[in-house]
Image (spheres, coloured by chain):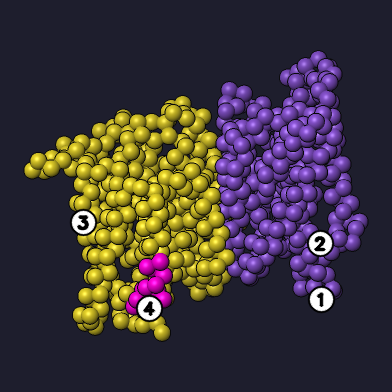
Amino acid sequence: MTAPQDPRSLAWTIGAAVVVVLYVILLLGVESQLEIAGLLAAGIAAVAVAARFGVVARLGRFLGERDALLNTLVVAGTLVVTAFFHGDAFVLLLMATVIIYFIACLGLNLQFGYSGVLNFAGAAFFGIGCYTSAVMTAHTAVPHLLILFAGGAMAAAIGSILILPVLRTYSHYSAVITIAFGLLFKIFLEVNDALGGPQGLRVKGMNVLGWKFNSNIDIGGIEVSFYVNYIVLGLVLLALAFTFVRRVERSWIGLNLDAVRLDETAAACFGLNITRWKITAFTLGNFLIGLAGALFAMMLGFIAPTNFTFGDSLILVSIVLLGGIGNPWGLVVATAILIVVPEKLQAIQEYRFLLFAAMVILILLFRPEGLLPRSLRAYFPGWRTK
Amino acid sequence: MDVGLLGQYIMNGLMLGMMYALVAVGFTLFFGVMDIINFAHGDVLTVGAFAALATILGLAGIGVDSPWIQLAGATLVAVTTMAALGAVIARTLVLPLKGAPPLNTLLITLMLGTALHEGVRLFYPQGANPQRFPSLLPTDAYSFGHFTLRIDSLLVLTTGLLLIVGIHLLINRTKLGLAIRAVAQDEDTAKTMGINYTLIVLATFAIGSGLAAFAGVLHGLYYSEVNFAMGLLLGVIGFSAAIVGGLGNIYGAILGGFLFSALQTIGVLAMPFASAYKDVFAFAVVILIMAWRPTGLISEKISQRV
């Protein structure tokens, strides 16, 4: 796809990217609660002003036609921030967490953003990935990179038990099935001694061909925190997952998924196999969530049932909703906000569930399409919606 | 199995079933008038139980020592405040989203539930820990072999039964009940007949939430303990009970409540070695029942319109 050349917009875009990177570095770097609160307020104000003068809309339109540029900018920006904080374990852990949650939310987005299959057990499937990687690193000699995919496969396999009940029911009813499964999963982990019970399990770090991910790296005398390993690996997986989700969205598969979500009856009348598409979306989504979980467990080194409560599932749902259902780019912003803000602003850490809940209620009442609403599908290259 | 022990299990099952039935009736009422599921219902129950607890402690604080007055005051406060809360929820969150996709209503009530129980956890003194609920009922007991009939259980059971009979009379014998049934049957026709739709929805939410508050007080009396997270489990169980009985059908909901407690009791009896798994068992059964009969054992009155 060749978009019209527009050097001024390009300069503006790169300028905006630099500003965003500087802002992120500043936000992650400062420690004082007051400064963080001030920075957040300044950020919101800046976005509001930019939106008022149409800058955001123009940038969005410009970048919407140039996916490759946007992708490059995001990856480059992440690497710049990582390089800046190369020794700061806490900040790097936060960044890696955002990346991993992003992968999980991409999976959730496939499920209810595209095909409209509800899943309120996101944390449970994430947990399945975590526990798979814990058990497999401890008891088998399977290469660790494969274990990541095994985590995803396990989540997809266990999710397939739920396929029949989820397919046979609709809206509220299928929501309850996934909620019941989420609760069941956590209770099961707590009472099951083989998987560590309430105390949880230790997980070995990632080890690829002798390259140990959980030891710090020393490059030319500069100590680099081991979390950089996970950020790089996470970015690679994220790039794969993101490309995959975008390709699915743009292909005829995505078109079918959209049709199934918007009107099941009409889609069935046009000969679409509803069952097949729902199963596809549900399984692929669970695979991505499980994959993210497996990597997360290796990075943390320790997992327990309390990481996988119903509240955590609701946070994943909130991210998808806040970002704008069906828009993968919205997820970046939403994940960053929901993960980073409570960690940095320790004052609200305790109140985060309450605040997120209130935020989602407000969004549903006043802006149900999310922060960055999904734009209309571009059917032809260069096709513009007025 | 010993007859006395069996009696004990049946008695406990009845108590649990009563609680579930009261919660399930709320779900079914809401679904009847609005075709929505209020996932905050279980957390309304939690807030109701804490309101009752606070009232009891408050009354004890100002020197009212009679347990009967304490209990009556607590129940009154809990039921009225939760009825008001229910009406507010309907007015501010449920009615504005009437035309929106079902996902939005679902999410908004789920998030409201989270906000409610998080509110209890954060703002009730020591709310993160389980709170002792004083046992206000007489604790005399009569033993028949292994079976101990406790007066407090009997009282709770009788009150619950009276309440269910009361709901039955309210729905079937009063003008309000007639209006609720009319709205549930056909909203538009009910409106043209001069029924104030908004008022009926608010009244229904008030009644349902009041019942949940009552169930919360029962829960406190029965377990002598309340905690901020209890509503989630009770909500899911109550909802499952309502579904099993067929949403929109009040008697089905009551039946579903008792059926669910029977399942749990049978689960404990059949697998005494795995009693830790009783909730796992109960939820697995819920998933299976819903896979088998997607809209409940007694089907919904109108199946999905095409």
The answer to which of marks 2 and 1 sits earlier in the sequence is 2
- A86 above or below B89? above
**Chain of the residue that carries numbered disc 3 in the rendered image:** A
The residue that disc 4 covers is A54
Task: Locate residue A8 relative to residue A356 in the image: left or right.
Answer: left
The residue that disc 2 covers is B180
Task: Locate residue B112 relative to residue B66 in the image: left or right.
Answer: left
Nearer to us in this view, B95 or B287: B95
Residue A80's tag is 3
Classed neighbour count for the residue bearing mark 2: other residues with Cα under 10 Å, few (<14), some (14–19), many (≥20): many
Q: Is the C terminus of chain A in the top left, top right, bottom left or bottom right quadrant? A: bottom left
Distance (Cα) linking label 4 and label 2: 50 Å
Q: Residue A246, how many percent across, how many down?
A: 34, 65
Tell me the amino acid under the disc marked 1: Thr
Both on one chain, marks 4 and 2?
A: no
Dot 1 falls on a residue whose secondary structure is: helix
Task: Locate residue B22 relative to residue A270 in the image: left or right.
Answer: right
Dot 2 falls on a residue whose secondary structure is: helix
Name the mark nearer the viewer: 4 or 2.
4
Distance (Cα) linking label 2 and label 1: 14 Å
